[in-house]
Amino acid sequence: MKHIVVLISGNGSNLQAIIDACQQKKINGTISAVFSNKADAFGLERAQEAGIPTHALAASEFASREAFDRQLMQEIDAYAPDVVVLAGYMRILSPAFVARYSGRLLNIHPSLLPKYPGLHTHRQVLENGDEEHGTSVHFVTDELDGGPVILQAKVPVFEGDDEDEITARVQHQEHAIYPLVVSWFLDDRLKMRQNAAWLDGVQLPPQGHAAE
Ligand code: GRF
């Protein structure tokens, strides 16, 4: 059985989608632990409900980002994860953390990367009058939201949409594509090589696998 560790900071709806996919055997693996940098993250309750061990670490108790990440790595490594999944983990990673899990570290970002790295993506889409928005699952590298894209899902933006509406539309897609990518990875179909994502031995284009 392959082991997944998930990192969250908040609601954990993507975590829930991965929990459900594991229970439904759509993912050949099990979530060994969920970590949060926020003790009150609702996602921790979702994990506990599913019988998954949880850990919360408070940044205020560490002298530096490096010290926090060192402790986090030590606790993560106790579970010997095959993949580390960032699911709404709102903390910048130290280079040592990225290096440790390089090639087995996934993130989901709510935009059609390389558009809108960073925060407030939905707001920017509305402000710029974009007609299309979406979400990207990518391998994590040292460049913030800049690692190779694996899979994107697009959503339309309708006239009069507010931030809540497009957030919900994007998240609906996230809950479909993130478990799928985790399943590809654990089935050994997905690799990161030469700063690119490869699926079934084929190098993926910059926008990731073309799934319609
Ligand atoms: C998601 O929209 C994801 O793209 C972003 O943070 C959000 C987390 O939502 N990285 P949730 O905690 O999974 O509900």
Image (cartoon, grey):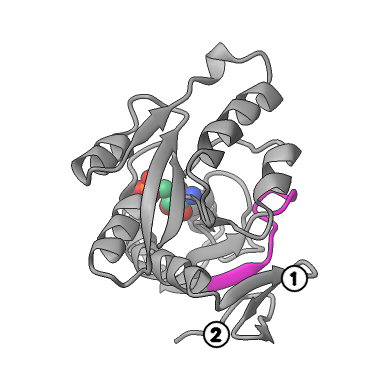
Residue 121: x %, y % from top left:
53, 51
Point out the tag, 1 or 2, that comes first from the N-terminus: 1
Q: Which one is in front in this view, the residue at disc 1 or the one at disc 2?
A: 1
The answer to which quarter of the image holds residue 170 is bottom left
Q: Is residue 161 above or below residue 118?
A: below
Residue 115: x %, y % from top left:
64, 62
Marks 1/2 in contact by CB < 8 Å: the verdict is no
Looking at the rendered structure, the number of numbered marks drawn on it comes to 2
The residue wearing badge 2 is 210
- How would you rate the neighbour count of disc 1 (Cα within 10 Å): few for under 14, some for 14-19, many for 20 or more? few
Residue 31 can be seen, yes or no: yes
Q: Residue at x 48, y 75 (%)?
A: 187
- Residue 92 as seen in the image, left or right of residue 88: right
Residue 182: x %, y % from top left:
46, 66
Amino acid type assigned to the residue bearing label 1 in the image: Arg
Magenta region, residue range:
141-151
Q: Nearer the viewer, residue 144 or 134?
A: 144
The residue wearing badge 1 is 193
Q: Quadrant of the C terminus?
A: bottom left
Q: Residue at x 34, y 32 (%)?
A: 41
- How would you rate the neighbour count of disc 2 (Cα within 10 Å): few for under 14, some for 14-19, many for 20 or more? few
Residue 162 can be seen, yes or no: no
Residue 72: x %, y % from top left:
56, 31
Q: Residue at x 65, y 55 (%)?
A: 140
Q: Residue at x 61, y 24 (%)?
A: 68
Q: Is residue 130 above or below residue 144?
A: below
Determine the secondary structure under disc 1: strand
The answer to which quarter of the image holds residue 161 is bottom left
Confirm whether the magenta stretch covers residue 147: yes
